[in-house]
Image (cartoon, rainbow, N blue to C red):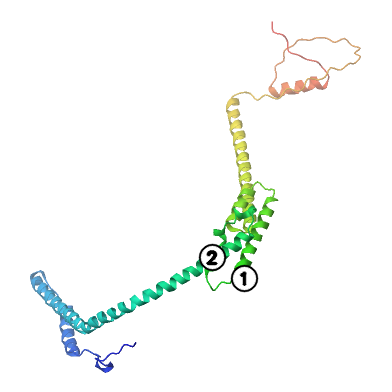
Amino acid sequence: MELKIYNPQDDGFVQKIEWNYEELKTEVAAAADSYAVSVYTDDTIKQAKADRARLNKFVDALKGKRTEIRKKLLEPDEQFGKEVQEIIGIVQRALDNIDGQVKDYERRQREEKTAKVRDFYDSNIHEDIITYLPFERVMKPEYALASTTMKSIKEEILSLIQKVDEGLAILNEVDSPYVGEMKEVFLRTYDIGAAMAERNRLEAAEQKRQEYVAEQARIKAERDARIKAEAQEVINAGKPVQTAPAPAPQPKTETVEDPVNVIDFRVYVTRSQAVALKDFLNNNGIRFEPVPKR
């Protein structure tokens, strides 16, 4: 089967459309140059509209002629295209029949290959991890292809089963409040490294959280202390400054030869003099006390 073109031959196709290109180009260029520098006033605007219409009509005529020539050039191709499509349709019916059978064969081959992979999986998976490693997570699209050998498939499945076994065993020994999150990551990726990285991430986040809480508590304590001090200053505003009373001296047992006399008197002193007087009495062991009011 071969397509042969009888007419036109290679040298019979239109190679170039010949027309008065150079002549028309020269004429149009001269007219366009004149119009390009034309100046119209309000009184000559009617002429401007007429000139614009004349030029648009000329442009439309050029475009129309090109469309006409294109259509004539494509007329043989339109008929040729219809005839080619008719023949393709005849061939396509046969092609569809063959293609359907080939695809059905390939589908059955994939199903048989998948069944073999499933049998191997069922023979090697154990109850401890079957929930975490279902066949749907093990099976890959390329396993069903004829180009993928059963030897390589078996090696990958056994390696994956071992990886899940060992990963879960490691995680079951981990003493961490984040072991649940670690297992979740591992069962999603089957990557023990990713699970450990998740623990590190969570621990770092918790440490930052605790540092933040401690910092906020410190800031609050400082703020509360400042507010309390400021409030106390307001309360004490206008009050005389009071010194803390000195601790009462412990009574001493001693032999006193001279009798102790009680003298009531009133003194007029400043605050600093009162403090000095009090210190003098204490330092000299002179007992004093407030005079009862009468």
Q: Residue at x 50, y 68 (%)?
A: 110
Left or right, 168 with respect to 94, comes to: right
Residue that badge 2 annotates: 114
Q: Residue at x 62, y 43 (%)?
A: 215
Q: CA distance from mark 1 to mark 2?
A: 14 Å
Question: Where does the image place residue 63, in percent across and percent down from the top left?
Answer: 18, 79
Residue 75: quadrant of the picture? bottom left
Q: Residue at x 61, y 55 (%)?
A: 130
Q: Which amino acid, mark 2?
A: Thr
Would residue 98 be seen by someone viewing this image from the given angle?
A: yes
Residue that badge 1 annotates: 151
Question: Where does the image place residue 73, in percent across and percent down from the top left?
Answer: 21, 84
Q: Residue at x 63, y 62 (%)?
A: 160
User: Quick one: which residue is furthest to the bottom in this view?
Assistant: 11
Q: Which amino acid, mark 1?
A: Lys
Label 1 neighbour load within 10 Å: few <14, some 14-19, many 20+:
few
